[in-house]
Image: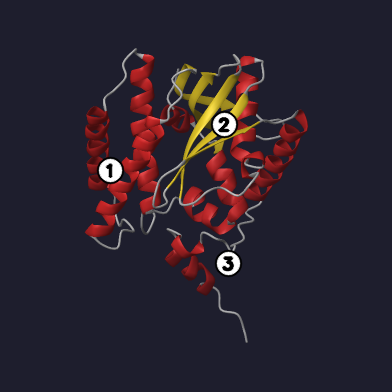
Amino acid sequence: MKTLLELRNQGPHHSHSSMSCFLNCGLKYYLKYVQKLQAEMQSANLLTGSVYHKTMDFFIGQLMDGRKVSEQELKEYFEREWSNNIAISKNLSFENEDEQNSMREKTMEMLKTYIEQFDYGQKIISHSESFIVKVEGVELPLVGEFDMVVLDKNKKTVIVDFKTASRSWPAGKENSEPQATLYLYAFKQMYGRSADFRFDVVTKGKQSKILVLPTSRKSEDFSRMARIYQQVERGIQAGVFIPNDTSFFCSNCEYAKACNEWGRCQQVAS
């Protein structure tokens, strides 16, 4: 099975991230995916999320090999990944070293919280399982990766996605998240059967807590997803890249300077 990186390198494609980027801000999509500009800064949250996921992948992989890693092993793996990611990252959005250390400690605390409450009764089927699927009416394939697939206590197949969040999710958010729709669609295309989905969210509050948020989708949800993706692809092909100046993500956007320059590149008579 090819890795997610190998699938990405095969050729042009869409993903949940790229589709969401276009829907949130067309100009950011253009700068990131069309012009392929280097980010002006790297979000500290993206770094911590990446290290969290890599450490979880190590933990799950060891379980599949019949090993339950110790807290010390986990901490050592996490510290190596943290240091490696810091070394290769440019223009991180940490204000100072104290903030970086604080976030490192908080991320390790979140990992410990999740693993202390991990359900060892579920059977792990796979982890970091990449996929590439076609969606009706969409020219390019969609690629992605299941963090973990398990059989729960009711023998139901469940795709699990690991998330970190600064606060608890609003009630019902999991039922409208497009990532779950795409991933459940992909699973059905790959295996010819349905599955359920679960977001395992660990919050970054003063005391980390776990939110276990199960969800499912119906055929009409997949049809709506396809219609949305079709419209997104048409917008991309037509070169319609409209900035969203009221986006929640504007304040920490890694393309803020390029966005401002885009706005000044054409003089308008006043």
Residue 68's mark? none
Residue 176: x and y in percent read: 66, 42
* 108 to 235, vertically: above or below: above
Q: Can residue 142 be seen in the rendering of this structure?
A: no
In the image as oriented, which residue stretches furthest toward the bottom? 270
* 2 to 248, vertically: above or below: above
Judge left or right: residue 6 versus residue 103: right
What secondary structure is found at the residue carrying circle 1? helix
Judge left or right: residue 179 versus residue 109: right
Instruction: Give the amino acid type for the residue marked by disc 1 in the picture.
Output: Asn
Instruction: Give the amino acid type for the residue marked by disc 3 in the picture.
Output: Asp
Lower position in the chain sequence, tag 3 or tag 2: 2
Disc 1 target residue: 85
Disc 3 target residue: 245
Q: Can residue 98 be seen in the rendering of this structure?
A: yes
Lower position in the chain sequence, tag 3 or tag 1: 1
Judge left or right: residue 81 versus residue 204: left
Give 40 or 118, whichever is nearer the viewer. 118
Colour treatment of the image: secondary structure
